[in-house]
Image: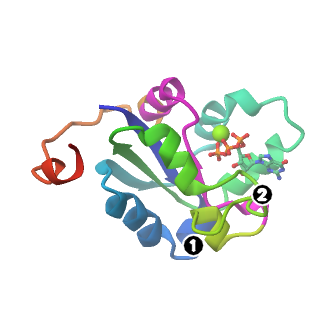
């Protein structure tokens, strides 16, 4: 099954938006495979955002992500990587469509509430990074009502 790593960033946790974000993925029909609140270390975040290490906003991004705990999740389902990002909305919340999480709940790119993996490959890398003990699959009876 396709999987993605969705993370509620510290602003989203503190603003009480974890439930809202979880609910959107649940209501869509995606399957919750793992969920944890944790206080990430600088090293962990630098690994997670390694691709952006050269960007001018990188130090600011790491500091933002260190302002509090994050809630990391693994969601599974058909097209969940691409559609998960559509549900989050464009990186810059001013460009995010209404109805998306960022479009509905935030304003600045440096406080954009949530993260979603950008490809199947990075999803699997991120899941291994944040859930090193592995993620166990389980059968959902409701799948017969979601998939044809
Ligand atoms: P993520 O799902 O968080 O990975 O966002 P993304 O894939 O849409 O964007 P990208 O991976 O390019 O950037 C990662 C994060 O860095 C963004 O979500 C923003 O929080 C932050 N970021 C990206 N561009 C800028 C920028 O120009 N300025 C600032 N301050 N932050 C940025
Ligand atoms: Mg990204």
Residue 102 at what x, y percent from top left?
64, 63
Is residue 5 found left or right of 94 in the rendered image? left
Q: Quadrant of the C terminus?
A: top left
Residue lying at 44% horizontally and 27% vertically, measured from the top left: 124
Q: Quadrant of the N terminus?
A: top left
Between 60 and 3, which is closer to the camera in this rendering? 3
Q: Which residue is mark 1?
A: 14
Image: magenta residue range: 108-127
Residue 94 at what x, y percent from top left?
78, 63
Per the rendering, the mark at residue 59 is: none
The image quadrant in which ligand 2 is located:
top right
**Front position among marks 2 and 1:** 2
Residue lying farthest to the bottom in this orientation: 16
Between 16 and 93, which is closer to the camera in this rendering? 93
Between 58 and 76, which is closer to the camera in this rendering? 76
Spatial CA distance of label 2 from label 1 is: 17 Å
The quarter of the displayed image where residue 104 is located? bottom right
Residue lying at 53% horizontally and 28% vertically, measured from the top left: 122
Residue 110 belongs to the span the image colors magenta? yes
Q: Which residue is mark 2?
A: 109
Q: Residues within 10 Å of mark 1 (few under 14, many from 20)?
A: some
């Amino acid at each position: 099954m396709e999987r993605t790593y969705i993370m509620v960033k510290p602003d989203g946790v503190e603003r009480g938006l974890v439930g809202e974000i979880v609910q959107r993925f649940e209501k869509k029909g995606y399957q919750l495979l793992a969920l944890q609140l944790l206080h990430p270390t600088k090293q962990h975040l630098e690994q997670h955002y390694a691709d952006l290490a050269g960007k001018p906003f990188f130090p600011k991004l790491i500091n933002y992500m260190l302002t509090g705990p994050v809630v990391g999740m693994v969601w599974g389902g058909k097209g969940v990587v691409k559609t998960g990002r559509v549900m989050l909305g464009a990186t810059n919340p001013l460009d995010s469509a209404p109805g998306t999480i960022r479009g509905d709940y935030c304003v600045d790119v440096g406080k954009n509430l949530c993260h979603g993996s950008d490809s199947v490959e990075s999803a699997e890398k991120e899941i291994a990074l944040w859930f090193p003990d592995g993620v166990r699959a389980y059968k959902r009876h409701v799948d017969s009502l979601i998939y044809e």
